[in-house]
Amino acid sequence: MAKRRLVSLDLDDDLQRQLSRHSLKTVQDVLQLSLLDQMRLLCLSADQARDLQLRLCSICAPKHNTVWSLLQQQRQGCSSLSMGHSGLDSLLAGGLQLSAITELAGPAGVGKTQWCVEMAVRCLLTEPSKSVIYIDTEAAFMPSRVVEVLSERLPPDEQHRVPELLSRIMVHQPSTVSSLHKIVRELEMQAAECGAGLVVVDSIASLARKEFPPHQPGQQGGAWRRVLLMAGWAASLKTLAANRNLVVLVSNQVSSRTVACEVAPEEEDEAALAPAGVREECEGGGGDGEEESSRSSLVQYRQYVTPALGNTWSHFINTRLILQYTDHSPIRQLLIAKSPVSPFATFNYTIEASGVKVQGGGSYSYSGSDPGLHMIHVEQGPIVS
């Protein structure tokens, strides 16, 4: 909130003129001044300067909540953004949580952008006073798709609302890491000015993976620089979500990983039949010395797909929803892989003209998984459009 513009505050007209005269545009600009400098530049008395300083500090300082107030917000549906399905919302304590970061991870074409558009439309329709900030790093955002979903959702006598609803979506399309970094830095100020209820970043990994490949030469390798960059973005997004009490939704790509495991000949057939998650951890042989060297073994390579950006990034997000293909096209699957309120769960969904439709009551299990190593079912063969 230190970046909040002073013009958005209810300040005296004379004070606003003095602030403008000295190019003091944000809360941070004023708080960096000493009390004496504030008195001199803004023509304030000591008491007035002290009151202004306390007011601006209260804007920057995080607000505390009691457990009771948080529980009341949850019961009133004020702490989440519904995903449009009672079973899914029930497991996620109402839907996407406010003051938190939710990630959608999945392979290309599985519907990550469709889910981002779906949640943007839901925010517009359920929160009449809220706006959406949409950051599109892959040029995947299609205004015509938003119009289609809105037109399908609104009754005939409310179709005239479409232009007004579209005007409440602010779209950024950065093409470099530096431009995205600048946008993220100024998000809190923009969110305060437009009254944002949802911030979408589609995708959080795209630009960072392009500009900082993992095997970049030099002492500061690409992977290390990328971790530092993502840590900074995650901190900014978490601060934004907490201070503005809004939903942050980011999409993430997937990475292919290959691991080697040693399989003894007598275990080869058993390992080949084991589930993928078991095969990755299988080890052959045992003992030491001559006994180990005399035992013949085979090295097998296992390939699996996991969310990109590594295990470190998985600790930055609060909730991870994995999207994957199924063997029954066009049905796809959403998995709750990481959540502070929900067990591991799966739901099938389809993409239709009216948006994303979650099917049935869903199924879930209490046997969870490591969010950094979750294997994702990808589509085999080329995608035909």
Image: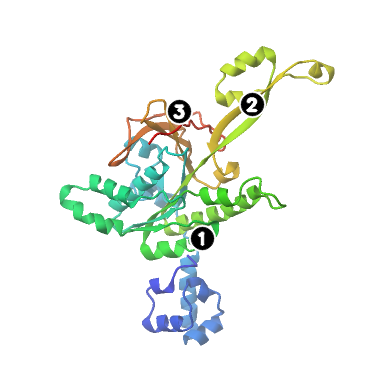
Mark 3 or 2, nearer chain start: 2
* Mark 3 element type: loop
Q: Position of residue 295 (x, y in %)?
A: 77, 15
Tell me the distance, in whole angstroms, between the alpha carbons under discs 1 and 2.
40 Å
Q: Position of residue 376 (x, y in %)?
A: 50, 32
Question: Which residue is disc 1 drawn over?
Answer: 179
Q: Is residue 109 above or below residue 282?
A: below
Instruction: Using the image as rendered, state which of residue 243 and residue 111 is in the foreground.
Output: 111
Question: Which residue is disc 2 drawn over?
Answer: 301
Mark 1 or 2, nearer chain start: 1
Q: Residue furthest top?
A: 266
How would you rate the neighbour count of disc 2 (Cα within 10 Å): few for under 14, some for 14-19, many for 20 or more?
few
User: Mark 1 and 3 residues: CB-CB less than 8 Å, in contact?
Assistant: no
- In the visual, does 157 lie left or right of 152? left
User: Mark 3 and 2 residues: CB-CB less than 8 Å, in contact?
Assistant: no
- In the visual, does 112 lie left or right of 361? right
Instruction: Using the image as rendered, state which of residue 142 and residue 286 is in the foreground.
Output: 142
* Mark 2 element type: strand
Q: Amino acid at mark 1?
A: Ser
Question: Which residue is disc 3 drawn over?
Answer: 365
Q: Amino acid at mark 3?
A: Ser
Q: Which residue is located at x 30 percent, y 60 percent?
A: 167
- In the visual, does 169 lie left or right of 375? left
Instruction: Using the image as rendered, state which of residue 111 and residue 276 is in the foreground.
Output: 111
* Mark 1 element type: helix
Q: Is residue 102 above or below residue 63?
A: above
